Image (cartoon, helix red, strand yellow):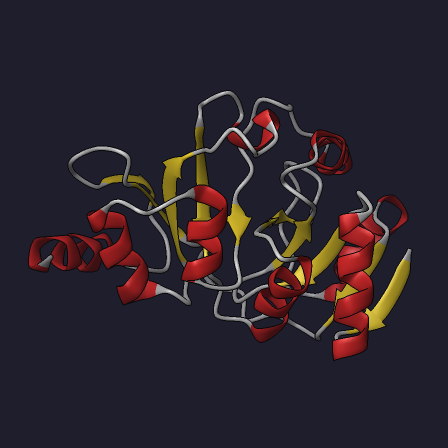
Amino acid sequence: MLRLRATPAAIEQAARVILAGGVVALPTDTLYGLAADPHRADAVARVAGIKERPAERAMPLIAADLDQVTACIGALPPMARALALAFWPGPLTLVLDAPPTLAPEVSGGTGRVGVRVPAHDVARALCRACGSPLTATSANVSGAPASAFPDEVERTIGARIDLLLDAGPTPGGAASTIVDVTGSEPRLIRAGAVPWSEVVACVDRG
C-alpha cells in the first residue's frame, strides 16, 4: 500500500489508481471511506472483499457536485433536487434509482443507489479527478468500528488496499442521514447527522 499526503498531485495519482480498477482509502466529512470506480464490477467486488462483507449489501457513493450526480445517475426528481440544493455538500445521502451503467453490486440487487456530495475538499477533488462518483463505504472490516484516523485505516486494512490518501483525522461524528426519494414522499432509511425534521421541512417548503 502507498500512503500519500492529500496534495493535488497525490489526488491525481489516486484517480489513476481508481480508474485502473484499484481501491483507495480517502477522507470524507465524517470518516475514512473506500473509493473505487462504481462502474467496474471487479473494483466493487474488491471493496466488498476488503471489508469481508456480503456482495448483496448496497454500497453508497459520493460525488464532486450536483452536476456530477446528474450526469452519472440521471436527472433528480424535484423533491431530491430540493434536498440536494439544501443539504449538499453535507451528510445527507439520497437513495435514487440506479442507472444500468453502474455495476449491479453497487445497488446490492435493489436497483437503487445512495449518493451524496461530501463537505470535504479532498473527497470532492478525487471525484472530480476521476470524472465520476465513487464508492465511499467506510474503510474498515465489516463489524469493526469505522475510523476517522488514517493510522488506524493503515493498521487494519492497509495490506488490502492500493493507496491511502492521508488528510489527517476526519471530523467523525454521526453518519450521514439516508433518505429514499424514489417515491412520492421521502422515506427515512437511517437517522444521522441531518435531523429528519429538517428533511421534512425542506420537502414541505418545496
Residue 143 or 140: which is nearer the viewer?
140
Give residue 172's position: percent from left, percent from top.
54, 65
Give residue 182's position: percent from left, percent from top.
28, 35
Residue at image x 27%, y 54%? 81
Specify whether 136 is left or right of 92: right
Specify whether 61 is left or right of 169: left
* Residue at far bottom of view: 7
Residue 161 or 9: which is nearer the viewer?
9
Specify whether 196 is left or right of 46: left
Residue 90 or 73: which is nearer the viewer?
73
* Residue at far left of view: 204
Q: Is residue 106 above or below residue 56?
A: below
Quadrant of the image occupied by residue 181: top left
Q: Is residue 127 above or below residue 179?
A: below
Quadrant of the image occupied by residue 125: bottom right
Give residue 30's position: percent from left, percent from top.
53, 63
Residue at image x 64%, y 24%? 55
Quadrant of the image occupied by residue 10: bottom right
Quadrant occupied by the C terminus: bottom left
Specify whether 61 is left or right of 146: left
> Would you say residue 7 is visible in this rendering?
no
